Image (cartoon, helix red, strand yellow):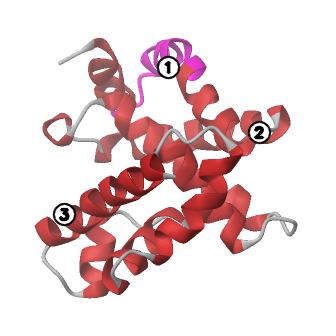
Amino acid sequence: MDELDKLLAKTALRDQQAFEKLYALSSPNLYGVALKMLKRKDLAEDTLQDAFVKIWYNAGHFHSKRGNALSWMISIVRYRAIDVLRSQKNVTDTDFVLDNLAGELNVSNKKNEQGLEDCIDELQEKQKKSILMAFYDGYTHQELSEKLKVPLGTMKSWIRRSLEKLKRCLDEI
């Protein structure tokens, strides 16, 4: 169990000193995730604060057997940032999905960003729907599995294969 896992476990017991140390150690990474997604310091700062409130109240739901603390906290920041982006009226659905997928696929040039939409259209319908629900609606693999009535392993495979296919498609552009 790494240090963040231990601090998160203590935070679940409402140990404020552990929470403060958890914040000090993880906030630079979490802020970076929020800033990359939101591209505005003020929104990233607000998102980080909201995420830490959620971390404080939900620390007891973290299980180190399912992953590490930092990944769990990053997912909280990511979902909060998605909520913020959805609330912005100047962001279209397509722009939102493309920005998030571009970040996931490490796409950094305009040529690939423009080609990403074409690549998404090449996916099978069920994979396309899964990717869009994951990256626009913020559904987890488990939630997608339940919503689309497929086994969890199948859902994880669809997402993984879809991301791999998108990456290959972008490499060909």
Which residue is under mark 3? Answer: 157
**Which percent across, then down, holds residue 166?**
40, 58
Give the mark nearer the N terminus: 1 vs 2: 1
In the foreground, 110 or 155 = 110
Q: Nearer the viewer, residue 96 or 70?
A: 96
Inspect the image, locate mark 3, and give the three-letter code of the amino acid beneath it: Ser
The 10 Å Cα crowd at callout 2, few under 14, some 14 to 19, many 20 or more, is few
Marks 1 and 2: which is nearer the front?
2
| CB under 8 Å between discs 2 and 3 | no
Callout 3: 10 Å neighbours few (<14), some, many (20+)? few
Is residue 134 in the magenta section? no
Counting from the top left corner in percent of width and height, residue 60 is at 31, 42
Report if the CB atoms under discs 3 and 1 are less than 8 Å apart. Answer: no
**Most common secondary structure along the magenta stretch:** helix
Whether the magenta-drawn stretch holds residue 15 is answered as: yes
- State the residue at coordinates (56%, 68%): 136
Q: Tell me the magenta residue range.
A: 12-28
Q: CA distance from mark 2 to mark 3?
A: 30 Å
Look at the picture and state if 166 lies above or below 171: below
Q: Is residue 7 visible?
A: yes
Reading the image, the residue beneath label 2 is 39
User: Which amino acid, by three-letter code, is at mark 2?
Assistant: Lys
Badge 1 amino acid: Ser
Above or below residue 74? Residue 11 is above
Residue nearest the observer in this picture, 162 or 70: 162
Instruction: Tell me which residue sits at (56%, 60%) in the image.
Output: 116
- Image quarter of residue 158: bottom left
Name the residue located 58 percent from the left edge and 53 percent from the top edge: 100
Q: Which residue is mark 1?
A: 26
Question: Total of numbered circles in the picture?
Answer: 3
